[in-house]
Amino acid sequence: MAARGEFSSRMGFVLAAAGSAVGLGNIWGFPTQVASNGGAAFVLVYIVLAFLLAYPVLMAELIIGRATRSNMVDALGKISGSNIGRATGIWGLVTATLILSFYALVAGWMLSHVIQTIADLFGQTALSTWLVTSSITRDVIFCGLFLCLTGGIVTGGVSQGIERWSVRLMPALFVIIALLIIYVSTLDGASDGWKAYLLPNFSLIMNPEILISAMGQAFFSMSLGVGTMLVYGSYVSKNENLPALGASVALVDIGVAILAGMLIIPAMYVALNNGVEIFSASGELINEDSLIFIVLPALFDTMGTIGLYIACVFFALMLIAALTSSISMLEVPVSYVIESKGLTRKRAVWTITLIVFAISSTIAFNMASLFGLVITITTKYSQPLLGLVLCVFAGWVWKRDQILAELKHGDEQAENSLFWKVWPWYIRFVCPIVIAVMFYRSITG
């Protein structure tokens, strides 16, 4: 078997792992959650819960991955010494594949919107209209193109594919967000958005619904539970200090979410100032897909020719965010197929990509019945339950001396660190209880 890949630098890993965590959910989900849940109060709760809940689970995945040097199925099989671990790994692998299947459709819409803005610039009205009009043909074509982009990157392996492109795409993402924030902040109405984003309503800070929302956002925004961080952890050098590395990933992820809020919330209020409706009939802010595909394009239309350029840059930003996440999701089943079935990386990547494309196409042909269902099953039910099971494996099944030995590879004084004094009992007792409560509240409404 070929030697396993490894990230060549700390920065490469941090940007790749943060790229996995930074997805469309950060850029369209987080800002609308903030705007609807008390502004800066929600941001504060989110930051606290990201470190109290998401960071410990992230560390469980990284430690398991590096210790076992395996894909998710074999890794959980090794630490549990049973088929229950392997079955959990397969469950995670299937969940990651299904998430990528609907994610590729949404990312395809981003790609079609990028090309639509270019078509508008060249006066290709008919093509432009087709690109932004929902149809099975459009959805399947652009989903396929996006999956080809993803597969092309993952074919390059860890250092020459995933890391190489992450260190290019992530800085580009930061630069685009920063430039758009500066531009949007100069427009009329932006100051109202900044007030909505930055002025906290502390009366809402202990509202159970806001706590649940912030917990869910923190957990899901770091792409936990489906093995992406476990697989990336398996490619980390033994010399790295894992708790510090994990903290860097969490900080970058939180930073991008907060930056996205600094862009989206002012942009929504600029749209309102320009006559675009941003509130629903019930008085709530329009969110997520309606925001991205209706409100913001309507805002860009009010800007004249400059709006076409801004729209192109904005949807390019969304496409980059989608791509950095999709490459990590594809790597989960690919790593398993390479290591367990002995396929070459190239063959494994394109086999899995074709399978994902087939599932995506099936969803596209049955959009009304399958799209929402697959999202609900994977993100509302499967992901939190997988996170819960990972806590059980790390806290109760895996021997504590083996965990400590793994941490000592990157820090000989790990036994005396604050992380080791807190994390073992925290992942054993606190995280499972909190995730279980969050899951119960989410399914009972």
Image: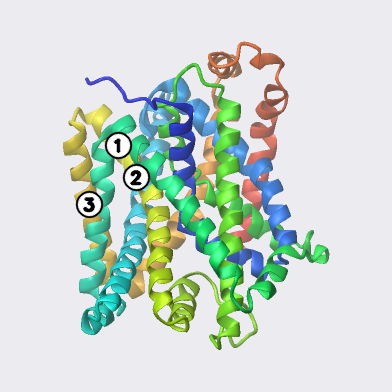
Compared to residue 285, the image places residue 326 above or below, namely above
Q: Examine the rendering and report whether any part of residue 439 can be seen.
A: no
Q: Residues within 10 Å of mark 1 (few under 14, many from 20)?
A: some
The image shows residue 344, relative to residue 175, as above or below, that is above
- Residue depicted at 65% across the width and 56% down the height: 214
Marking on residue 327: 2
Identify the mark at residue 311; answer none if there is no mark.
none
Count of marks, rendered view = 3
Q: Earlier in the sequence, mark 2 or mark 1?
A: 1
- Horizontally, is 411 left or right of 198 in the view? left
Give me the residue at 66% from left, 26% from top. 424
SS under mark 3 = helix
The figure's colour scheme reads: rainbow
Per the image, the residue denoted by label 3 is 148
Residue 372 image offset from top left, x and y in percent = 41, 68
Residue 332, horizontal then vertical, whole percent: 35, 39
Residue at which label 1 appears:
161
Q: Going by the image, does 13 lie left or right of 253? A: left
Question: Crowdedness of circle 2 by 10 Å Cα count: few (<14), some, many (20+)?
Answer: many
Residue visible at 30% across and 37% down in the picture: 161
Q: Earlier in the sequence, mark 1 or mark 3?
A: 3
Q: Are marks 2 and 1 in contact (CB under 8 Å)?
A: yes
292, 53: nearer the viewer: 292
Q: Is residue 248 above or below residue 140?
A: above
Apparent side of residue 399 relative to residue 298 in the rendered image (left or right): right
Separation of residues labelled 1 and 3 (CA atoms): 14 Å
Under circle 2, the secondary element is helix
Rendered location of residue 233, percent (x, y): 45, 30
The residues tagged by marks 3 and 2 sit, at their Cα atoms, a distance apart of 11 Å
